[in-house]
């Protein structure tokens, strides 16, 4: 018995020493292992780089706290686990969950503040032992870094999806949502974007929400090509000061001089974002007395420029069986107008099928009067292309 006891004590001492040694070593070396099948806790290198740059306390207030149904409980748990992962890599990231409407006396004032900040709440039904109650949920978080802050949408709005489907998609999107918000507040604005004007492009009022979002991370400025004819070199040099040029739905043809400046801008490393309609077609035409729409080619004099880079935008309209619906009045019942949903094949509903960072975990996109892009063979490498998208669908 004494030999057995000595042996047990010796084994116990060895285990204790080993545990102490492991703890000492682990305090100097950090490594986490993701044993889940879908690698849900494996952060991308881009996210890790952003987290690494957090040099002072970054406070995350998560407003997803309260009496929730199982779907929102899952979103809450996944958000907590992701933030714990962030904190494990960088202790400067601090988070806290709170119920913003817990105090009934301040409920109305708090909800008003959230509305004004662009964080709309949701009303959900909670089944408590057979009794249905209504609860207000704020699926939002707010990240603060110094004097800068950014809101984080925890629940994605998917058209026609159930709450469970929205939560599943949102869980997959959480890492990107937080990484994007962190990147906005820890980095100072450095790059500049030019919004090209002068060829009948969209007025700012039609892309205000888009510009407001981009302005959080970049400097924006309008840029016209009016002086190209008289001062092409000066115009090109001024355009080179911008890292990106956005051309949003032009309706007037580009001159040869304007195309030359844009081409030289691209050749010298500039980037362009083209949002084009290859065919003139708009819903407003359907509201005319005839109720018909005449689709015409949108002649912008850009075919040769795109052809040079191996792209052809065909002046055609895509009809797709995987499309969204359009609501039409079919009659009246009493004083009420009756509506029915009809499949509208000119509005394809497209789901990205690749894992490219630009579209990974992105929900379906509704297109309107979409034209196909043809990729031509030449010595220019094409990394990623997508269908033409009207900017009003962004």
Image (spheres, rainbow, N blue to C red):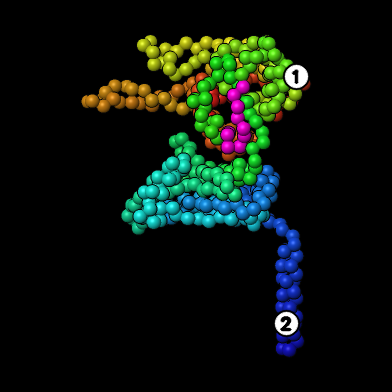
Q: Residue at x 75, y 70 (%)?
A: 21
Mark with earlier residue (2, 1): 2
Foreground pick, 290 / 113: 113
Q: Quadrant of the N terminus?
A: bottom right
| Residue 217 falls within the magenta-colored stretch | yes
Residue most extreme to the bottom: 2
- Asked whether the viewer can see residue 319, the reply is no
Q: Residue at x 73, y 19 (%)?
A: 264
Residue tagged 2: 9
Give how far apart the Cα atoms at labels 2 and 1 are.
75 Å
Q: Is residue 29 left or right of residue 319?
A: right
| Residue 32 falls within the magenta-colored stretch | no
* Number of disc labels: 2
Whole-percent x and y of residue 109? 38, 48
Classify mark 1: helix, strand or loop: loop
Q: Is residue 23 left or right of residue 63?
A: right
What residue range appears in magenta?
214-223
Q: Is residue 164 left or right of residue 268?
A: left
The crowding category of the residue bearing disc 1, from other C-alpha atoms within 10 Å (few below 14, some 14 to 19, many at least 20), is: few
Pointer 2 and pointer 1: residues touching (CB < 8 Å)?
A: no
Residue tagged 1: 378
Picture layout, residue 94 above or below residue 297: below
Foreground pick, 99 / 383: 99
Whole-percent x and y of residue 259? 67, 14
Picture layout, residue 158 above or below residue 286: below
Picture layout, residue 79 above or below residue 176: below
Query: Residue 30 occupies which quadrant of the picture?
Result: bottom right
């Amino acid at each position: 018995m004494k030999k057995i006891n000595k042996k047990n004590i010796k084994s116990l001492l060895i285990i204790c020493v080993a545990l102490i040694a492991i703890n000492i070593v682990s305090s100097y070396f950090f490594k986490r292992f993701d044993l889940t099948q879908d690698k849900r806790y494996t952060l991308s290198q881009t996210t890790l780089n952003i987290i690494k740059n957090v040099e002072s306390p970054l406070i995350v207030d998560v407003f997803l706290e309260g009496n929730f149904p199982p779907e929102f409980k899952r979103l809450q748990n996944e958000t907590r686990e992701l933030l714990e992962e962030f904190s494990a890599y960088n202790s400067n990231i601090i988070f806290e969950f709170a119920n913003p409407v817990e105090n009934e006396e301040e409920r109305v004032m708090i909800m008003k503040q959230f509305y004004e900040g662009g964080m709309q709440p949701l009303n959900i039904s909670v089944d408590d032992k057979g009794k249905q109650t209504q609860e207000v949920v704020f699926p939002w978080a707010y990240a603060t870094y110094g004097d800068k802050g950014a809101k984080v949408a925890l629940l994605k709005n998917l058209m026609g999806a159930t709450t469970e489907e929205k939560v599943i998609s949102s869980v997959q999107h959480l890492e990107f949502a937080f990484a994007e918000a962190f990147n906005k507040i820890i980095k100072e604005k450095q790059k500049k974007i030019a919004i090209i004007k002068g060829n009948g492009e969209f007025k700012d009022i039609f892309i205000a929400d888009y510009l407001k979002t981009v302005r959080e991370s970049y400097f924006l400025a309008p840029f016209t090509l009016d002086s190209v004819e008289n001062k092409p070199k000066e115009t090109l040099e001024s355009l080179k000061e911008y890292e990106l040029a956005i051309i949003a739905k032009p309706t007037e043809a580009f001159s040869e001089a304007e195309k030359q400046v844009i081409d030289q801008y691209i050749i010298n490393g500039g980037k362009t974002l083209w949002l084009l309609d290859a065919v003139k077609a708009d819903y407003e035409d359907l509201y005319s007395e005839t109720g018909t729409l005449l689709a015409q080619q949108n002649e912008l004099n850009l075919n040769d420029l795109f052809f040079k880079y191996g792209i052809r935008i065909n002046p055609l309209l895509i009809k797709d069986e995987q499309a969204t619906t359009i609501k039409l009045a079919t009659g009246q019942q009493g004083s009420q107008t009756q509506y029915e949903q009809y499949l509208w094949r000119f509005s394809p509903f497209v789901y990205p099928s690749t894992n490219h960072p630009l579209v990974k975990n992105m929900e379906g996109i509704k297109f309107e009067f979409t034209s196909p892009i043809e990729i031509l063979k030449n010595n220019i490498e094409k990394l990623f292309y997508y269908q033409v998208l009207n900017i009003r669908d962004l």
